[in-house]
Image (cartoon, helix red, strand yellow):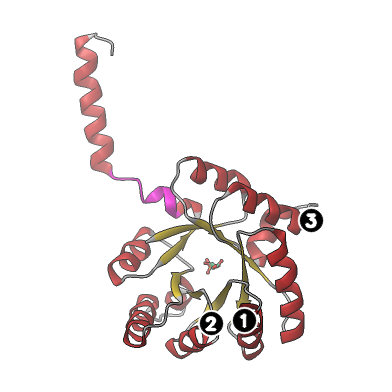
Amino acid sequence: MKIFLDTADLTEIRRANDAGLIDGITTNPSLVAKVAGERDPKEIYREICETVDGPVSLEVVGVDRETMVREGRKLAQIHENAVVKVPLTEDGLKACRDLVGEGIRVNVTLCFSVSQALLAAKAGASYVSPFVGRIDDISGEGMQLIHQIRQVYDNYGYDTEILAASIRHPMHVVESMLIGADCCTIPPKVLWQLSKHPLTDRGLEAFLADWNRLGAEL
Ligand code: E4P
């Protein structure tokens, strides 16, 4: 499963990228607003694309087809790693089809149902982003949606990649892998939580205590 980092924070991106742990990045307007300050978001996008050797999702902010297509073209020109993110609306699906026709990769975002995911695939999206955590937030079963989309895409051979999004904790990542999501976009905090285990810490402490009694050096 591909791991994308769900952030526009370049410090976090470099930290994970330097460890060789990530395959790409997803951003959204809220994530960019958190880090931009006085900077032009397009500069941040360029820097992210130059840092990470993989797809970087950059989201349009227009709501009608024409504006989304215009913005999508501009975003795609920022860097060859750019993937244009459009919302799963009627206009978003039409803009997706238009952009795909121009050879631009599209991530259809804000997906909350299997029927929406079907249309994203029909529109030629490279990725569909089902928002697991936001469904859980309203007492739904976010992972169930990933299951259903996997089944539908496999039944009919759609090659749109399922990008599990709105990930809140390590179990979302584990379940995404077990179901067979193609990618999971993970906030930095959750990425590092994946590496933690109390038995690792306890085991390391004991190994080092035993070694230190030797008074030897390597
Ligand atoms: C996906 O691409 C989105 O950026 C993201 O996963 C949204 O997550 P949130 O529900 O934590 O805002």
Q: Amino acid at mark 3?
A: Asp
Q: Which residue is mark 2?
A: 124
In the image shown, does 102 or 190 lie closer to the viewer? 102
- Asked if residue 129 lies in the magenta stretch, the reply is no
Closest to the camera, between mark 1 and mark 3, is 1
On the image, the x and y values in percent for residue 80 come to 64, 59
Q: Amino acid at mark 1?
A: Cys
Is residue 64 at least partly visible in the picture? Answer: no
As drawn, is 20 to the left or to the right of 194?
A: right
Q: Quadrant of the N terminus?
A: bottom left
Q: Residue furthest top?
A: 215
Q: Which residue is mark 3?
A: 40
On the image, the x and y values in percent for residue 45 come to 68, 56
Q: Which residue is mark 1?
A: 96
For the record, the magenta segment spans 190-197
Q: Quadrant of residue 3?
A: bottom left
